[in-house]
Amino acid sequence: MKKIISTPNAPAAIGPYSQGIGFEKLVFVSGQTPLDPQSGLVMEGGIEEQTRRCLDNVKGVLEAAGSSMEKVLKTTVFLQDMNDFAAMNAVYAGYFKSGAPTRSTVEVARLPKDAMVEIEAIAHL
């Protein structure tokens, strides 16, 4: 049976989706953009600040589900500009110190609210 995950430590959904879904021993985290959970505004700054906010939002959903960044199995990173890959990757590496999960990174034409990056995750509970 699936369990809807909702937390004030990540932005509220801006459409018909859940922040996360727990199912059996997995948690699926919806794509997190660099929205501040309190203001709902896109984080100011460059790709580093926006990547950090995305990953903090992912972390908030994971913790609400009873998981953690250490239990992430797979992420998908959506970049508005692949030229930002190295800078995003440097911030990303700091969140996965005990072994990085599998990952796909793709360039997209546009992201919600014109964000520079969006990150989704699948983790073990």
Image: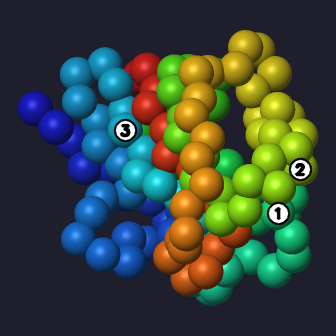
> Which residue is disc 3 drawn over?
28
Residue 93: where, in percent of width, then height?
Answer: 82, 32
Q: Is residue 66 above or below residue 30?
A: above
Decide which of tag 3 and tag 1 comes sooner along the chain.
3
Discs 3/1, front = 1
> Which of the two residues, 42 or 62, is positioned nearer the viewer here?
42
* Three-letter amino acid code at the position of disc 1: Ile
* Three-letter amino acid code at the position of disc 2: Ala
Residue 55: where, in percent of width, then height?
Answer: 67, 49
Residue 97: where, in percent of width, then height?
Answer: 81, 21
Toward which corner of the image does residue 122 lie, by quadrant?
top left
* Three-letter amino acid code at the position of disc 3: Phe
The CA span between labels 2 and 1 is 7 Å
Decide which of tag 3 and tag 2 comes sooner along the chain.
3
Q: Residue at x 55, y 73 (%)?
A: 110
Decide which of tag 2 and tag 1 comes sooner along the chain.
1
> Which residue is disc 1 drawn over?
47
Residue 37 appears in the figure: no
Q: Residue at x 41, y 52 (%)?
A: 30
Q: Is residue 111 above or below residue 88?
A: below
Which element type, helix, strand or loop, lies under badge 2? Answer: helix
Residue 12: where, in percent of width, then height?
Answer: 43, 72
Q: Is residue 6 above or below residue 121?
A: below
Toward which corner of the image does residue 125 lie, by quadrant?
top left
Say whether marks 2 and 1 touch (CB < 8 Å).
yes
Which element type, helix, strand or loop, lies under badge 1? Answer: helix
Q: Residue at x 38, y 77 (%)?
A: 14
In the visual, does 28 lie left or right of 2? right
> Which of the two residues, 117 or 30, is positioned nearer the viewer here?
117
Which element type, helix, strand or loop, lies under badge 3? Answer: strand
Q: Which of the image's four quarters has the N terminus?
A: top left
Q: What label does residue 87 carry, if any?
A: 2
